[in-house]
C-alpha cells in the first residue's frame, strides 16, 4: 500500500479517519444468519467481505478532495462512515465541522411529504434549526427550480426533481463540510453547471468539499488532492493528475505498486536528450504489455520544423514511431491533449478516424502522424500517446505514455474555455 504521508500539523483538520475497516458477513441463505446468531450452528456460515481495510484519510479545512476508484473499491462506504450512516468495524473517525451530505438519491426523503416538508425534514436531520431553514428557504427553492412540484408529494417526482431538491437543500444551508457521492450525474447539463458554480463559491469561501465522482475532468478541475481506492485499500493519494493516471492503469489491470524495469520502456539516453529540448517529460508515466513500443515522438509546425511551440490557428502534426514485438490483429493508435492540471481537453485515435484498421505482424515498424489545426487557447498543454487494441473482445493496452510531450500554444486572441469556436461575427 502506498505511503499515506505525514499529517500537516500547521493546518486545521476537518475530517480524520484512522485505520478504518468495514467488514460485512455474507450468507448463502437467509436462515444461516439466524442460526449463527442463535448459536445453533458450530460451523461458520458467513463469508467475510472487507469493503475497507485499514484506510487512513485526513482532510484539511478548506480543501476540495476527490475519491476515485473502480466499482466496489469502497468509495461510498468511506463517505457513509464519515457521515455516520455506517459504523466502522474497526478504526476511528473524527469530524470538525457541520456536515451536509448528499449520498444517495432521495435518501432521507419521506415519499408522502411534499417538497417543502422534506426541506424542513432534511434540514432538521442535518442539525439545522427551523429559523436557519426559514432564512434559506427562498434560496433552496430558487436553486432547485422545480416549480409548483414543490407542493406535491415526493412520490410524484422524477429522479431529476429528487436530485435538484436534495442538492439544493445540501448546498444552500451553507454547511462547513459538503460531502457528495455521484449525485450530479442525474441532473441535466444546466443543473450540473449550476452545481459546479456553487462548488466554486464554496471553494472561494474556504469551505471543505469531499466528493466521489467518475467524472475525471471534474476531479482534475476542482480537487486540490485525490485519494485512490481499490478493493477497499488506499493505493495512493496526491495531486489529481498523477492519481488519475494511476487510476487508468488500475482500470486496465496494469498497475503495479513496485514496478520493475525489466520492460522499461524508453531508452534513458533518448529521454534525457529529448528532455534537454524542454519538450519531453523526464518523469513520464508509461505502462503496457509492450507488444508494441512507441518511440521517436515529436511535434512539427506547418512548415515541418520540429518544435515545442505551435501558433494558434495554424496546422501542426504529431509524429511517433511504433515497433511491434508481437502479431497484433488491429492496433489502435491514439493521442490526447490535457491541461497542465490534468483535464483531458481533446484527443482522437485511428479507429475513430477510420484511418488504419489492418493487422500488424511481429517485427513491423510503423510511423504514425496526426495532422490538424491548432484551435486551443494559448497556454501550456501535455500530450499523451498510446497503442491499444482488442483481443477476443477484451481491451488491451500495448503501450501508453502519459504527459510525454509539452506543447506551448502561442496566441494573440483567446476566447472563453479551452478552444476557439473561430466564429465569424456580423453586426448589421
Image: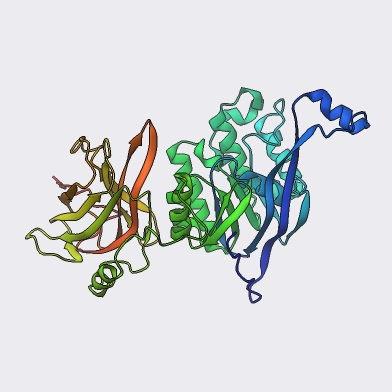
Please indicate, yes or no, whether residue 328 appears anywhere in the rendered image.
Answer: yes
From the viewer's perspective, tell me whether residue 202 is left or right of residue 254. right
From the viewer's perspective, tell me whether residue 115 is left or right of residue 70. right
- Residue 262: name its quadrant: bottom left
Q: Residue 277: horizontal and vertical position, in percent?
A: 22, 73
Q: Quadrant of the C terminus?
A: top left
From the viewer's perspective, tell me whether residue 426 is left or right of residue 178. left
Q: Is residue 91 above or below residue 397?
A: below
Q: Residue 214: horizontal and vertical position, in percent?
A: 49, 44
* Residue visible at 27% across and 71% down in the picture: 269
* Residue visible at 52% across and 46% down in the picture: 213
Q: Residue 207: horizontal and vertical position, in percent?
A: 60, 61
Q: Is residue 109 above or below residue 299?
A: above
Q: In front: 370, or 265? A: 265
- Residue 36: name its quadrant: top right
Q: Residue 370: horizontal and vertical position, in percent?
A: 18, 49
Amino acid at each position: 500500500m502506498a505511503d499515506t504521508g505525514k499529517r500537516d500539523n500547521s493546518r486545521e483538520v476537518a475530517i480524520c479517519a484512522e485505520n478504518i475497516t468495514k467488514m460485512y458477513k455474507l450468507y448463502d441463505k437467509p436462515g444461516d444468519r439466524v442460526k449463527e446468531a442463535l448459536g445453533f450452528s458450530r460451523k461458520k456460515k458467513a463469508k467475510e467481505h472487507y469493503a475497507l481495510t485499514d484506510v487512513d484519510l485526513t482532510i484539511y479545512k478548506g480543501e476540495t478532495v476527490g475519491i476515485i476508484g473502480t466499482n466496489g473499491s469502497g468509495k461510498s462506504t468511506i463517505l457513509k462512515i464519515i457521515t455516520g450512516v455506517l459504523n466502522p468495524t474497526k478504526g476511528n473517525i473524527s469530524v470538525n465541522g457541520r456536515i451536509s451530505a448528499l449520498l444517495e438519491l432521495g435518501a432521507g426523503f419521506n415519499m408522502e411529504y411534499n417538497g417543502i416538508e422534506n426541506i424542513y425534514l432534511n434540514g432538521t436531520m442535518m442539525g439545522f434549526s427551523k429559523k436557519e431553514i426559514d432564512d434559506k428557504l427562498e434560496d433552496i427553492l430558487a436553486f432547485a427550480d422545480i416549480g409548483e412540484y414543490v407542493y406535491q408529494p415526493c412520490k410524484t417526482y422524477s429522479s431529476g426533481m429528487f436530485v435538484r431538491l436534495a442538492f439544493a437543500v445540501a448546498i444552500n444551508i451553507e454547511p462547513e463540510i459538503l460531502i457528495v457521492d455521484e449525485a450530479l450525474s442525474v441532473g441535466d447539463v444546466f443543473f450540473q453547471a449550476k452545481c459546479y458554480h456553487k462548488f466554486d463559491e464554496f471553494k472561494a469561501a474556504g469551505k471543505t468539499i469531499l466528493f466521489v465522482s467518475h467524472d475525471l475532468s471534474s476531479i482534475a478541475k476542482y480537487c486540490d488532492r485525490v485519494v485512490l481506492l481499490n478493493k477497499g485499500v488506499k493505493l495512493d493519494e496526491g495531486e489529481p493528475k498523477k492519481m488519475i493516471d494511476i487510476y487508468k492503469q488500475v482500470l486496465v489491470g496494469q498497475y503495479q505498486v513496485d514496478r520493475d524495469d525489466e520492460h522499461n520502456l524508453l531508452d534513458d539516453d533518448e529521454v534525457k536528450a529529448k528532455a534537454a529540448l524542454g519538450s519531453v517529460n523526464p518523469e513520464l508515466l508509461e505502462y503496457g504489455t509492450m507488444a508494441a513500443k512507441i518511440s521517436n515522438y515529436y511535434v512539427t509546425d506547418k512548415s515541418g520544423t520540429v518544435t515545442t511551440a505551435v501558433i494558434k490557428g495554424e496546422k501542426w502534426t504529431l509524429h511517433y514511431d511504433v515497433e511491434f514485438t508481437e502479431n497484433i490483429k488491429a492496433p489502435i493508435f491514439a493521442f490526447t491533449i490535457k491541461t497542465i492540471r490534468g483535464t483531458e481537453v481533446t484527443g482522437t485515435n485511428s479507429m475513430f478516424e477510420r484511418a488504419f484498421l489492418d493487422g500488424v505482424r511481429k517485427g513491423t515498424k510503423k510511423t504514425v502522424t496526426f495532422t490538424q489545426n491548432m484551435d486551443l487557447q494559448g497556454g501550456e498543454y501535455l500530450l499523451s500517446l498510446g497503442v491499444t487494441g482488442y483481443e477476443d473482445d477484451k481491451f488491451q493496452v500495448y503501450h501508453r505514455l502519459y504527459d510525454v510531450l509539452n506543447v506551448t500554444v502561442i496566441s494573440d486572441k483567446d476566447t472563453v474555455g479551452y478552444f476557439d469556436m473561430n466564429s465569424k461575427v456580423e453586426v448589421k
